[in-house]
Amino acid sequence: MHGKKHSPGEEAYRVVPARIEGGGRAVVSQAGSVLLAETVRKVGLDTAISAALAPWRKARAVHDPGKILLDVALAVALGGDCLADVAMLRCEPAVFGPVASDPTVSRLIDNLAASGEKALQAIRSARSEVRDRIWSLAGENAPDADGQVTVDLDGVLVIAHSDKEGAAATWKKTYGHHPLTAFVDHGAGGTGEPVAVLLRPGNAGSNTAADHITTARLALAQLPKKYGRGRQTLVRTDSAGGTYDFVSWLAKRGRWLSYSVGMTITEVIHEHVLKIPAPAWTAAVETNLAWMSSDLGQIRNADTQGRTAWLCAELAGHNDLRAWVLSTRSKVAFWDGRLREAVNFARRGATYTTTGTVAVLLACQEADAWSQLGAYDEALAALSRAEEIRAAVSGEDEIGGIFACQPARQVNYAAAVQLRIGRPADALRSAEDALALLTGQPVRAYGTESQIRISQAAAHLATGEAEGAIEALGPVLALSPDHRLAPVARRLNELRTGTGRPEVSGTVAGLQQAIEEFCVNSAPRHLALSPGEGAA
């Protein structure tokens, strides 16, 4: 039989409406696979794979290589473990369309295998293209809905009960294969999404850096292009990935991937950690990676770093460290929208006896979260407590450093709370007081000053003084992109959307446009889109 010329994807799966019947008549075996076949058709995977494998289709071939490969994949999903198991699809042509014979399937696999990397790259490109489309369609349910993607790398042992190709003795004294897998994390509400598998013999090492690098490359190639490098992509491994070569590859200049690598803490390591004097642990909080990550909009990274900092504080048994870490975790939870957690972290931190200004900061953070939750009495009570603590502050901020809660910062928290509870006049006075206090501080943090000026502008707008708002925001909008921190951009955006009424004046409309341009070119976007060097 001579075949006719087909266009890519022409041999698509049948459109079969899915419904449930209990009669038991005209039953189709493996009917659940209809949902898989329909998903393949809806997202365009059939046409993408067909187009990618078009070079492997002979001129007079009847069956499309892309359709054959998808049939094999469907057969595996239905429990098949060899090429001949496509027979379960062949017997239901009304559901799966024309299915190639076993010899045709075998010849295609031989041809693809002979092409090696070229065929693999074609298939990978098609999968990547379709994945990008699916994530766009998924919207808030996509794994990158928060602007970040987490890729988990891990090895797995696959037992072989006979002498299969590549099977060998494993480190667990079994026999089989030891592939290295990469899954995109879908959070607590979903399972992982497989993006890459590196086939390896059973005796392959667990901590082979070259294999981790290869798998990471394959995984990154499957993600939308914007996640191929940059801090918004987090690569996680257990202790097997804790090699110098792999971590150096992840952190290479121009690649700038975030990473979290596990470490096995043995009893010996634990004993030596406990011998480190408490003051030596201050660097864990003073550098405060979690604080800086949240300023750059990397909330997931900040959360991971906050948990790590808590472990350091607990090991040190240092109350000031504990309080500062809980303050950091309260901040991260607040900007992540987990307001109840923000309150709880702040309250936990307040239970420790501390020196310096951390207790003031914790009370202010509690007030901030309460006001956002609409609990105004609790917010005002927390502000009053912050004032009482300020009066009793003793000792230097040895740990807080540049993150210490200076008076200007405390008053700005009050201004933000006053705005939320509907007291714009009080908020305006507080913001002006905060700016005056800021000029007398030895260290003038541009992030704090920006927050104060945003509070001042919001108060002006709430009292109908658009010109005052523009004047207040002038220095903020003039910040260079590297100084446009995520919390600042977020508050500005809230200010912009809050002025989005139809009757806004031309002055306010111009301010909205300026804020939008500021947010588009903020520090997190500037970092994520930086071309860097050596991204290969």
Image: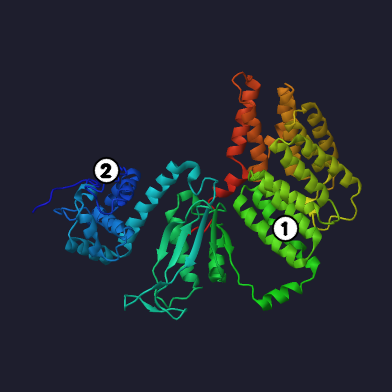
On the image, the x and y values in percent for residue 487 come to: 67, 42
Residue 455's label in the rendered image is: none
Q: Could you tell me residue 335's position as x and y percent?
A: 66, 44
Q: Name above or below for residue 395 compared with residue 365.
A: below
Q: Earlier in the sequence, mark 2 or mark 1?
A: 2
Identify the residue position indicated by label 2 in the image. 16
Q: Say few, some or many: other residues with alpha carbon within 10 Å of mark 1 (under 14 / 14 to 19 / 20 or more).
A: some
Numbered tag placed on residue 287 in the rendering: 1
Q: Is residue 273 left or right of residue 501?
A: right
Quarter of the image for residue 20 reads: top left
- Residue drawn at (70%, 52%) of the image: 329
Residue 484 visible (yes or no): no
Q: Nearer the viewer, residue 97 or 11?
A: 97
Residue 326 location in percent, x, y?
73, 54
Residue 219 in the figure: left or right of residue 306: left
Select label 2 or label 1 by which is in front: 2
> Which type of secondary structure does the marked residue at label 2 adopt?
loop
Q: Is residue 155 above or below residue 388?
A: below
The picture places residue 30, in percent across and down from the top left corner, at 28, 54
**Residue kind at label 2, given as amino acid type:** Val
In the image, what residue occupies the spot 68% across and 39% down?
479
Element type at marker 1? loop
Give, as a three-letter code, the residue at label 1.
Answer: Thr
